[in-house]
Amino acid sequence: MSSAAVTLPVKERFNLPDGMIYLDGNSLGPLPRAVPARLASMVGDEWGGHLIRGWNVDGWMAQPVSVADRIGRLIGAPQGSVVLGDTLSIKVHQALSAALAMRPNRRVVLSDNGNFPTDLYMAEGLIGQLDQGHELRVVDPEAVADAITGEAAAVMLTHVDYRTGRMHDMAAITKLAHEAGAVMIWDLAHSAGAVPVDLAACKAEFAVGCTYKYLNGGPGAPAFIHVRPDIVDDVEPALSGWLGHDAPFAFEPHYRPAAGIERMRVGTPPIIQIAALDEALKVWDDIDMDDVRAASIALCETFIAEVEARCPQLTLASPRDAGMRGSQVSFAFEHGYAAMQALIARDVIGDFRAPDIMRFGFTPLYIDDGDVRTAVDVLAEVLDKRLWDDPAYQARGRVT
């Protein structure tokens, strides 16, 4: 879809507090302005007025696939190959369990130490549950290509590293996995809505992701899973929930998986959250991901140059090459947590990831060059005046 008539950013589409520079959309996206009215209508008119009739009258039952198609456009997935529901951890479990069943004579799950921990935790739990001698083999991100061998049942990677923003070459890694006979699983949590993705072209079997980051679906927004259309009817769902049944309201005593992507549904869809996400995704209707990527790179490059010129206390932790980096920039600093709290107190919002990473996300939908330069002004002041060295900024909250 062309975005010739759209000039980024489109700040008017978001509800951002006056004076705030929000560089944390890679963790939780801001509220699109149209969402509150949509939620009010959903709660008051649909739930309030229609009650249980809403499943049919308002099309609630179809929304996990129909709304997911909006995401499909942003990740290069064919229509009808993505479904919403549950959490990202559940979707990782679904994809990995299906992948291992597809390669019953192999025992290695290959990942890297830049993968998001929940993916590794789910793999550990599944391997323990299966108790069939599988091994989770974790290597450095740079070593993944050489580690893909005929032992691998599945290669499971996060496309964009949540800490550093390092980005894998999706097409190249997927090709290597397929040449080795392995199943490919991509976690797109930090990619969907941030960088162009073409799942149809790379032919990965599975992709999963969350919708509360760059897609602005709100806290607790449902996750998604993509299954390549030519294999989906052969996938055996390990989590055989009733809404993944071929005829859930026949109430049969035994499970029969539904046709196509519907079989990857598990439990009752979170309809209120899906309504918020559906409205949030309308922000993207006239936005082209190539334009987003170009603007993102420009913002990140400016930020890196300004920080390195003015904040020598920080060390770049992200790849310097923009082509190897997602839509975030991370710097390492010994006092990174306290420094980030000092920034947040001054309305420059980023976040911190242990042990010493200050993360800054750049979403061109609501961030411009002036925001970047102002953010660096505040960051330089925090560092030069040691404003972070205040007891108020040392105590760690439950969420960093």
Image (cartoon, rainbow, N blue to C red):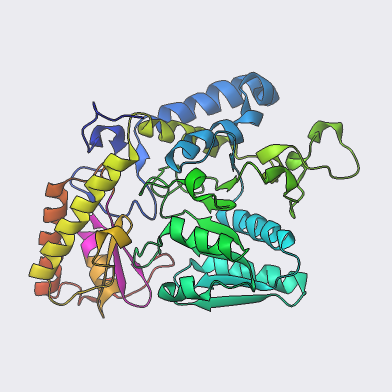
Quarter of image, res 168: bottom left
Rendering coords of residue 56 (x, y %): 68, 22
Q: Does 57 appear above or below 197?
A: above
**Where the C terminus falls, by quadrant?**
bottom left
**Position above or below: 294 against 331:** above
Stretch of the chain drawn in magenta: 343-362
Residue 150 is a magenta residue: no
At x 51%, y 32%, the residue is 275
Left or right of 271? Residue 8 is left
75 over 155 or under it: above or below? above
Residue 32 shows in this picture? yes
Q: At which x and y percent is residue 161?
A: 40, 64
Q: Quadrant of residue 114?
A: bottom left
Q: Nearer the viewer, residue 156 or 244?
A: 156
In this rendering, is residue 159 above or below 386? above
How many labels were placed on the picture?
A: 0
Camera-side residue of 379 and 364: 364
Q: Residue furthest right?
A: 253
- Report which quarter residue 394 is drawn in: bottom left
Q: Specify whether residue 350 is in view.
A: no
Q: Is residue 195 left or right of residue 217?
A: left
Query: In this image, 313 relative to 13: left or right?
Result: left
Left or right for 109, reference 276:
right
Image location of residue 169, percent across then percent down: 40, 60
The residue at 35%/44% (across/down) is: 30
Q: Nearer the viewer, residue 199 or 315?
A: 199
Q: Residue furthest bottom?
A: 334
Instruction: Depth check: give the residue in front, 389 or 72.
Output: 72
Report the quarter where the N terminus lies: top left
Q: Position of residue 238 (x, y in %)?
A: 75, 55
- Residue at (74% x, 53% y) in the render: 239
